[in-house]
Image (tube, helix red, strand yellow):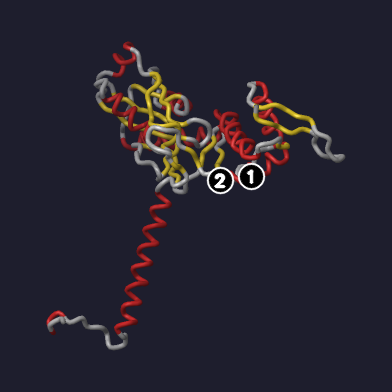
Amino acid sequence: MLSRRHERRYPDQFSETTYKILLCLIFLYCFFHLLLSAHRHTKLLIIYADKNSKGYMQDKFSCTVVDWNYAYDLCKDASEEIKATGFQPEVVVGVARGGWFLARNLCDFFLLKDLLSLKMEHWGIAATITGDAKLKYGLDDRAREIIKGKRVLIADDITDTGDSLKFVVEYVKSLKARDVKTVTMQHKTSSAFIPDFYGELISDWKWVVYPWSIHEDVMGLLERIMDKEGEGVSLHDLKTAMKAEFDFYVPHHLLREVLENMAFHGKIRIKSERKKEGEEGEVWLLC
């Protein structure tokens, strides 16, 4: 039994039961607020089987498309962010392959001649992680000499998990660069790594489709749909599924173009079927 000094006291207008209910409601509110916040700032769509095996993405997620003009504007915005700090890079390192467009434009904006590149591997087909970020192609001896003692700007298209950029920063620092900064066209708040500069902040996780990888990304998404269907799928049904599962509207001509490219590379085959008048008589199957 509590002494009078430690006795709990409640406001006159509330009974002890009411007070406890209010405390429970406050606790539940705080708990769900934290839960929703964590959901927003982590990429819950990405599910790892384990650290050393291939991961995969949930069946449905949203895509957003960046065209050439918007991509160029993002490059300009990122360069303005850099200039505002007074940082003047001497060498640009473009992370292959996504960082090449930004890297080349930055060389133009900063009047630079030295553009180097290295290749990281982390993502497989659209929105699928293939494991830990790994360096596939590094810099040769001549490139390492160029970097030594210089102000280096590392460019990539986007921070998704941030693993690739984090690895590249440590790699470039090990080559005795004078200063190392990072820049991306877009930065996702879900990323564990925050670049020094970026053109745009993305708060809600979506898979971003860039114009230089449109065939690759659409192809990867179509393969998901076809694999799930397990039988021939018409162009109309593929177009509908792309919108329903990935919130991705793909124009008819582009969809056919990608499908024909997939057939050229032996990924799918075309099967003709008899259809009602006015309907397409082709279905597409994975090889």
Q: Nearer the viewer, residue 194 or 75?
A: 194
- Mark found first going from the N terminus, 2 or 1: 2
Placement of 156 over or under 200, stated as above or below? above
Tell me which residue sits at (42%, 40%) in the image: 187
Disc 1 is placed on an element classified as: helix
Question: Where residue 27 sits: x, y (%)?
Answer: 34, 68
Q: Are marks 2 and 1 in contact (CB under 8 Å)?
A: no
Residue 155 in the figure: left or right of residue 247: left
Q: Position of residue 59 (x, y in %)?
A: 55, 44
Comparing marks 2 and 1, which lies closer to the viewer?
2
Quarter-wise, where is residue 54 in the image? top left
- For mark 2, what is the residue? 60
Residue at point 71% right, 37% down?
233
Q: CA distance from mark 2 to mark 1?
A: 10 Å
Q: Amino acid at mark 2?
A: Lys
Q: Which residue is mark 1?
A: 243
Looking at the image, the residue that sits furthest to the top is 142
Crowdedness near tag 1: few (<14), some (14–19) or many (≥20) residues, C-alpha within 10 Å:
some
**x, y (%) of residue 193?**
34, 39
Q: Residue at x 37, y 67 (%)?
A: 28
Circle 2: element type: loop
Q: Amino acid at mark 1?
A: Lys
Does the image show residue 115? no
Name the disc covering residue 282, or none: none
Above or below residue 275? Residue 7 is: below
Q: Quadrant of the C terminus?
A: top right
Number of numbered discs visible in the structure rendering: 2
Picture coordinates of residue 9 (x, y %)? 22, 83
Residue at 12% x, 82% y is: 5
The crowding category of the residue bearing disc 2, from other C-alpha atoms within 10 Å (few below 14, some 14 to 19, many at least 20), is few
